[in-house]
Amino acid sequence: MIRLRSILQAFLLLIGMASAAMAGPYEDALPKFAADSYSDTEAAIGAVAASGHQQALSLVEALREGRLMVANGQVYLRGAAGQFVDAATGQVVEAPAGAKPVRVNNRVRRAVEAALGGMTLLSPDAGTRLDAARAVFRSRDAAALPALDMAIAQESDSKVKGALESARAAVLLNKSDASSSEKLSAVEILHGRGDQDALALLSSLSPGTPREVSEAATKAADGIRSRLALWNAVQNVWYGISLGSVLLLAAIGLSITFGTMGIINMAHGEMVMIGAYTTFLVQEVIRTHAPGLFGASLFMALPLAFLVAGLIGILIERTVIRFLYGRPLETLLATWGISLILQQGVRTIFGPTNREVGTPAWMSGALEIGGLSLTYNRVAIVVFAFAVFSTLLLVLRHTSLGLYVRAVTQNRRMAGSMGIRTNRIDALAFGLGSGVAGVAGVALSQIDNVSPNLGQGYIIDSFMVVVFGGVGNLWGTLVGAMTLGVANKLLEPYAGAVLGKIVLLVAIIMFIQRRPRGLFALKGRAVEA
């Protein structure tokens, strides 16, 4: 019996020795996660990342996501479904009592990002490699250099290779034992990158940096600042064109009604709102009955928004405005009252809160050109605004309705004496302007909150555009919208949004005093009288 017990003890001792011999850097690092020390956790992350263990990536990802748990000195990975996996064996186990997540701070988070970057630099997926290169660039962890060199040698994607080279340059520039030639090469690469992150690296070199490297970095930083200033100016011009296209969409319908009938339509913004809510309803129907058509929802909403807003505009003109021609103050008050009625009606039906209007997949994302970022939804709105302008210009220039509208605009009495039914043209023109405002609401639903107050933010700016460009002149509306949009965005960095708008308003008032008819005055006997 004693002999059997001795044999069993020797066997268990051999198993323990074999297990100890099989333990590697990964297994040795696990207890450090249970030490509840940020320094030990950071050291454990580096050891795990360098171990090459098959569980290493899952463990570091779990730490980043707050799913690395510790209980009774053991380390576990908590899965998405709540199951627990032993970090040492990879086996699913019962949930341990008193399990707590491993604590992290900013230093540990940086170590996690660096480790993930180093472990995923050789991933077969290009997107994963790109994210890994960006993570190493942010962390500047020297331990990732061997993996970076290997990844650069194997990389075939030019975009990913550029990111890898930038990450390597960032590491070398902050590596104390890197040679001056390596650091000068890193400065050149970062200068070619030319963004804010590169500028921050070049502007924050350590005090012990060689003189020639510091001088090269200073020169490169100055070049990046000049380049960024130029790109910022171009970006502000683009923002101005984008704002101008929004103002064009909001004001172009008002230009027709204001120019044709001289009506100060304070309910014009509510036509924009109605178009936006029509888009919301179309998307709700598509989500419920045909989700596969969501990408085409805006194209379906365009004709419906035009019809709904246009019919409401004709109804307003036939029931209210037709009795107030020649009485501008009463018309202003009446349309203001109508705008309040429409807002309250929408609040009653849809509620006072914002409604979600989704963005189709083809409008998501951005196009990067140098330092210029063009979001697809803004590009689509600019193109759409010019398409609406061109279509409306063709209607007014090459259709009988457009001929009658221009005739009534230039000389109402003469047009009436020639047999044109001016009352009918008034109704159609008001409906056309309201319908175009509804179409504008479809576009604005992609960049603004869809709420009962949507139109109020554009009515004043729309009148400014129409008056500045010239009442009833579409080309004046286009030039006025783009001029105000670009001027507003160029002034904002220096004067602020509010003061910039005040400066523009004062400038328009002074301009109107010199040219009361705006940039492009209409020609005609009645107009010139």
Image (cartoon, grey):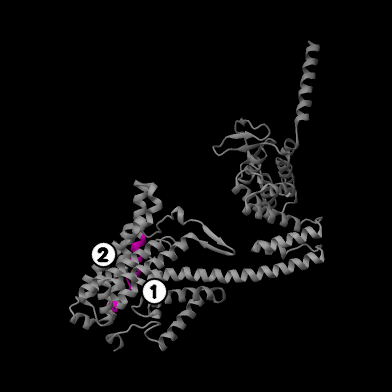
Image side of residue 261 versus residue 514, left or right:
left
* Type of amino acid under label 2: Leu
Which sits in the foreground, 223 or 265? Answer: 223
Left or right of residue 384: residue 114: right
Work out whether residue 178 or residue 50 is closer to the camera in this orientation and state it: 178
Q: Which residue is mark 1?
A: 462
Q: Residue at horizontal 60%, vertical 71%?
A: 230
Q: To which quarter of the image does residue 213 belong? A: bottom right
Q: Position of residue 303 (x, y in %)?
A: 32, 60
Please name the amino acid that badge 1 sits on: Ser
Q: To which quarter of the image does residue 495 belong?
A: bottom right
Question: Does 313 appear above or below 13?
Answer: below
SS assignment at label 1: helix
Q: Counting residues from the N terminus, which is met first, the one under dot 1 or under dot 2? A: 2
Which of 22/164 is in front? 164
Highlighted magenta segment, given as a residue range:
260-276
Predominant SS along the magenta part: helix
Q: Does 44 sit left or right of 270 as displayed?
A: right
- Residue 27 image position (x, y, % from top left): 73, 35
Camera-side residue: 323 or 337? Answer: 323
267 within the magenta span: yes
Helix, strand or loop at disc 2? helix
Contact? badges 1 and 2 (CB < 8 Å): no
In the picture, measured across the screen, residue 372 lies left or right of residue 306, that is: right
- Percent coordinates x, y for residue 378 in the rendering: 47, 63
From the image, tell me which residue sits under label 2.
Answer: 311
Above-or-below relation of 104 to 75: below
